Amino acid sequence: MIKPQKLSPGDKIATVSLSWGGPSVFPHRYQVGVQQLKDKFGLQVVEMPHTLKDADWLSRNPRARADDFMQAFFDSSIKGIFATIGGDDSIRLLPFLDLNVIRNNPKIFLGYSDTTISHLVCYKAGLTSFYGPSIMLEFAENGGIFPYVVQSLRKTLFSSSVIGEVNPEIDGWTAERLDWADPANQQVKRTLNPSTGWRFLQGHGVHRGHLMGGCLEVLDWARGTAIFPANWQDAILFLETSEEAPPPETVKRILRVFASLHILSKLSGILFGRPGGEVPVEKFKEYDKAILQVVNQEEGLTDLPIITQMDFGHTSPIFVLPYGVQAEIDVDSKRFSILENAVVN
């Protein structure tokens, strides 16, 4: 895998709207995220030609969105590319993307949710990309970006040192929705639920492998396409569910598909984010049960490490996961670590 250069204060990053045109619908929310990039990290922010275009226009013009992505990679003055927000149709960009442009112009690409598609494109091109915050969500968090997010970004994108152990957020988490249409809500901090730590469902010992995954539903959409990953041997699969809160039955069915594709039997471990959307805490164990039914009971993979209710995906705050980088699950010590640097000097 090609690792991109690290970010430093003063670097220029491009914002891209690869799916939904959120910045045109809630411009104040987008601007808050941009200001956080400037204030917290000292970055210069530039929009690509269509980043701020009307959402309906962007929906009708996937090629324009793809052109923004390619132009951002091709522009040597740009050091990183950050998704404004997710959506549901990044897959429509595939006919217009050039893997050689990505491969020959490596740089940081950051986002999550529907951006899973773009991450798979980067992985196919051989580039490490980063499953993490988008402009209008974590960067534009009500009342200011979470310190947990800042710490993860600094360790992962701004330092070429080994990332090391990743710890659970201890100050609480949230999936509360506050209406973005009311700018006054921007100053209202979301209600935090108590942190209960991550759940180690099964396994023992130490297991290592390269990180691969994304949003469960979006990863499933990519099946059968040229970008669906081929190298699952010893991978640590990370999965999370969207704000649409698919039920445990959906998780179970998609995992069964992965089992039929002989993916689960090749893995070194599974990481599962806290269920996305406003799922009651008392239902979290139903997701754990669905995962165990497929992995443990149906497939007999009783030693495969599984960690659930982790701090990534569609609850906040989140840490950053770099694609293709070696990670480690130490079940006995209940630790998760990223064993490499994800960026270079």
Image (tube, rainbow, N blue to C red):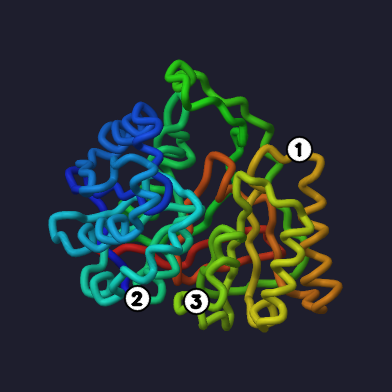
| Residue at (56% x, 74% y) in the render | 223
Q: Nearer the viewer, mark 3 or mark 1?
A: 3
Looking at marks 3 and 2 on the same chain, the residue that comes earlier in the sequence is marked by 2
User: In the image, what residue type sits under mark 1?
Assistant: Pro
Q: Residue at x 35, y 60 (%)?
A: 161
Identify residue for label 1: 280
Picture disc at residue 117: none
Viewer-nearest of discs 3 and 2: 3
**Along the viewing direction, whichever of 113 and 197 lies nearer the viewer:** 113
Residue depicted at 47% across the width and 19% down the height? 182
Disc number placed over residue 125 in the picture, else none: 2
- The location of residue 163, given as percent across then percent down, is 43, 59
Pick out the residue farthest to the top: 184
Point 56% across, 50% down: residue: 312
Whole-percent x, y for residue 244 in the image? 64, 46
The amino acid on which the numbered mark 3 sits, given as a three-letter code, is Thr
User: What's the CA distance linking mark 3 and mark 1?
Assistant: 35 Å
Left or right for 254, reference 67:
right
Q: Badge 3 is on which residue? A: 225
